[in-house]
Amino acid sequence: MSPLPLTLVIINLQKQTSHMKKIGFYLLVLVATIRCTTTAPIDFIRASCKTTLHPFLCVRCLSSYAGSIKGSDHHLAKAAVIVSLNEAKSAAAFVSKLARLSGLKPREYQAVKDCISTMTNCVVSLNQSVQELERMGRRSVDQDFEWHMSNVETWVSSALTNQNICSGGFGVDGHVKDAVTKRMVYASQVTSNALALVNRFAVSHRKGSHKP
């Protein structure tokens, strides 16, 4: 049996990813419904997400964390970065699969390889951010707050930059570029929201309105 054309392979990868995302979303909604006994946590998320560039996506991604966020800017920021990290890992895995496909043009292959490298850095930055936010939760948030917060803001911003670099590295139009761009646009929207909520946490803490 002859191998499938490259276009069909990419479409199949996108369909598989989309199907898994839909299943995951419905499960998250179910978990959120079970865990949230009041609307207050969801209302807090909705209000907070209004400060992001993609508020609907923000609420959709964070609804399942409502029970653990409990009106805390710190927990909200951490949940947003965790969502961003998970999406970055998924996007990185998708791009890695593309690199193993036959039929890629030399320039496409090099762009995919470069994207894998930048997404690896992206995942590292977001993982560091999650760990830093967790460390901040285990000690007084006033202890070296600015230093810890600066680290998180820098790493999340770096992750967003790497996602944009990945999608912008394809000079040749085609199905590979379209597939990668679609994934990176979504990932960058999620990360943009995370960065906005991290910044919101920093501002609210400095104003003394942070809820531990």
Image: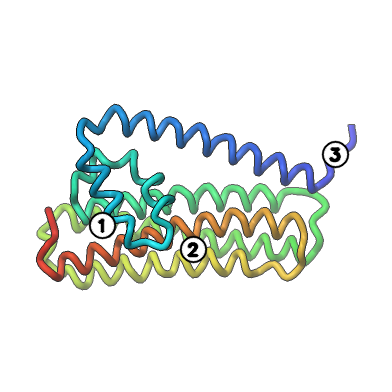
Q: CA distance from mark 1 to mark 2?
A: 19 Å
Identify residue for label 3: 3
Q: Residue furthest right?
A: 2
Q: Is residue 36 found left or right of 24 in the rendered image?
A: left
Identify the disc placed on residue 133.
1
Element marked by disc 3 = loop
Note whether 168 is above or below 64 in the view shown. below
Hey, which quadrant is residue 13 in on the image?
Answer: top right
Residue 119: x %, y % from top left? 53, 60
Instruction: Pick whichever of labels 1 and 3 is earlier in the sequence.
Output: 3
Q: Report the residue at 63% width, 53% height from top.
A: 95
Element marked by disc 2 = helix
Instruction: Pick whichever of labels 1 and 2 is earlier in the sequence.
Output: 2
Note whether 115 is above or below 44 in the view shown. below
Q: CA distance from mark 1 to mark 3?
A: 46 Å
Hey, which quadrant is residue 55 in on the image?
Answer: bottom left
> Looking at the figure, which quarter contains the N terminus?
top right
Q: CA distance from mark 3 to mark 2?
A: 33 Å
Number of marks drawn: 3
Residue 193: x %, y % from top left? 39, 59
Residue 195: x %, y % from top left? 36, 63
Q: Nearer the viewer, residue 89 or 187?
A: 187
Identify residue for label 2: 121
Is residue 118 at least partly visible in the picture? yes
Crowd band around label 1 with a 10 angstrom C-alpha radius: few (<14), some (14–19), many (20+): many
Q: Is residue 92 found left or right of 148 in the rendered image?
A: right
Residue 77: x %, y % from top left? 28, 56
